[in-house]
Amino acid sequence: MTKISIIMFSGTADKLMPVGVLASAAAGLGYEVEIFATFWGLLALKKDAPQPDVSKDYGPMAEMFKKIMQEKNMPSFIDLLRQAKEIGNVKIYACAQTFDMMGLKKEDLVDIVDDVIGAMEYLEKSKDADINLFI
Amino acid sequence: MSEVKPDIVVDARGSYCPGPLMELIKAIKKAEVGQVIAVYSSDSGSKTDIPLWVEKAGHELIAVNDKGDYTEFLVRKKK
């Protein structure tokens, strides 16, 4: 079976959206999907996380992108990940190091997170993936 | 060309990639084998993604109809 593994590192909307879109598309194709949420990507999965902003790297385009997303009522990356989980085999792991560093508890995270795992376990899980992405 | 009447209509217009495909997948899961599902999509990614998925998943793409500002995909559930 084809497998895709994504390290979800970034916490801005412009990078979280592609994670959601690719996870949904991969789930639709019947791929096994693994997501390792770390650093800003994990913080974006907190229940009380604010709506993610668009990265300032894109200057005035950032505001435009944000406005378009709102106007067109785009689903959030969490909705996309939830949808991916509904239709396929998608596992979302929280990075243990970030989890501990930020003093998080499992119940602080949205219910789409399956487990908290360390970097070694993630590497062992992802080494046989056909597609490996860092976003 | 003979008209195929869909059993289920999924109106995914206004939804973005991969939304329409996701709606189709959910509809196919619920449908019975042999039923025809029509998906309306205004997303340009659907034109490649829906036929690709239908083939991979082993269903039948009956027709792709250009309706101006959206595309209608007719899919028969095969298994």
Image: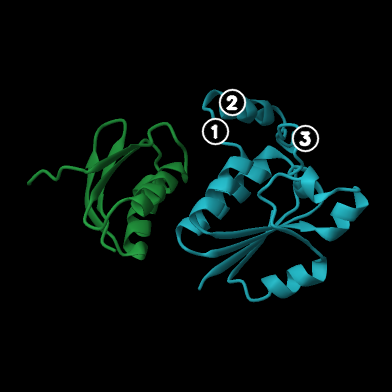
Q: Which mark is residue A74?
A: 1
Mark 2 nearby-residue class (10 Å; few <14, some 14–19, many ≥20): few
Q: Which residue is mark 2?
A: A70
Horizontal relation, residue B20 to residue A126: left or right: left
Which residue corresponds to the image point at 72% horizontal and 35% vertical from the top-left?
A52
Q: Are marks 2 and 1 in contact (CB under 8 Å)?
A: yes
Amino acid type of the residue that numbered disc 1 sits on in the rendered structure: Met
| Mark 2 chain | A
- The amino acid type of the residue labelled 3 equals Asp
Tell me, for residue A28, which label it has, or none. none
Q: Are marks 3 and 1 in contact (CB under 8 Å)?
A: no
The colour with which the image depicts chain B is green
Q: Can you tell which chain is drawn cyan?
A: A
Q: Is residue A94 left or right of residue A132?
A: right
Mark 2 or mark 3, earlier in chain: 3
Dot 3: what SS? loop
Q: Position of residue A65 (x, y in %)?
A: 62, 30
Look at the numbered disc 1 and give the secondary structure of its residue: loop
Residue bearing the label numbered 3: A48
